[in-house]
Image (tube, rainbow, N blue to C red):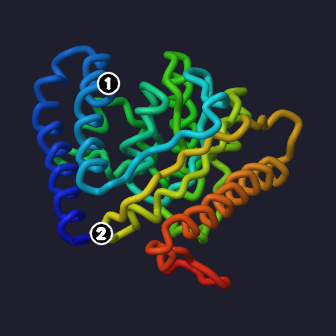
Amino acid sequence: MIYIRSFLTNVGFFGTLALGCVIQLGVALLPQKATIFFWDKIVMPIALYWVHLFGGIKFEVRGAENIQNKNVLYACKHESALEIYSFTQFVPTTTYILKKELIFMPFFGWTQYFYGMIPVNRKGGAAAMKNMLEEVRKKTDNGRPVVIFPEGTRCRPGTTKGYKSGIMFLAENLDLPVVPVAVNTGFFWAKNSFLRYPGTAVFEFLPAISAKGKTKAEFMKELEDAIESKCAELNRETVEKYPYVRHILATNGETEKE
């Protein structure tokens, strides 16, 4: 049954995204607000409906009092595609920092460009960092929250690939608060897996932290400790509630292969 439900979930979800990307070519002729509305209010609610209907995946937001809708950076744990596709359902108009190569993908990449994603050349050095800073400044000045995945890639629950200091660079230079976000999404929409397991995907928004008066080491430790400790709590809660996903959790010092 899990294979059938996963198949239907994937077809419904990615089919909706594919259709949205085609329609986007026409929507792109309108102001960017039309693209944001199209994806936040039409495409993604439909796509996530299939995730709930066929996949049995529900969403729960915790720490809603810590959500800010403008002048803020979100540092989110990245375990699955769900962080990218569902975040705007909790924080409208959110945009993301992503690797530049993704923008050039036909249809899907073009859609990210029109939506207002912020592409970054990871090998561009100081020039790329300066460009990223200016692009994030433009977005936040226009009232759009920006999400950063500080590990730079998806990680299996129970693992981390190390937090990168780009978030500190942005927070310090833009004088913006950083809201850490912990998740357990990797249990239900596992990295590089066809299977979709039913359960409640939790997004927990933690109290904002500031870079003011802190060294890079101090800020990065505070951020990583906040996210990883809360993720550990969510991991324990999840495997207790849904024992059939226990095999996904990395344990006993297990590390994730690149």
Q: Secondary structure at mark 1?
A: helix
Which disc is residue 211 wearing?
A: none
Q: What amino acid is at disc 1?
A: Ile
Q: Which residue is mark 2?
A: 195
Residue positioned 60% across, 83% down in the render: 254
Quarter assignment of residue 250: bottom right
Q: Using the image, determine if residue 65 lies above or below residue 57.
A: above
How far is disc 1 from disc 2 in space, using C-alphas?
29 Å
Q: Which residue is mark 1?
A: 36
Rendered location of residue 214, percent (x, y):
86, 42
Q: What amino acid is at disc 2?
A: Leu
Quarter assignment of residue 203: top right
Q: Secondary structure at mark 2?
A: loop
Q: Which image quarter holds the N terminus?
A: bottom left
Rendered location of residue 8, percent (x, y):
17, 58
Q: Callout 2 environment at 10 Å: few (<14), some (14 to 19), or many (20+)?
A: some
**Residue positioned most to the right:** 213
Q: Is residue 169 left or right of residue 9?
A: right
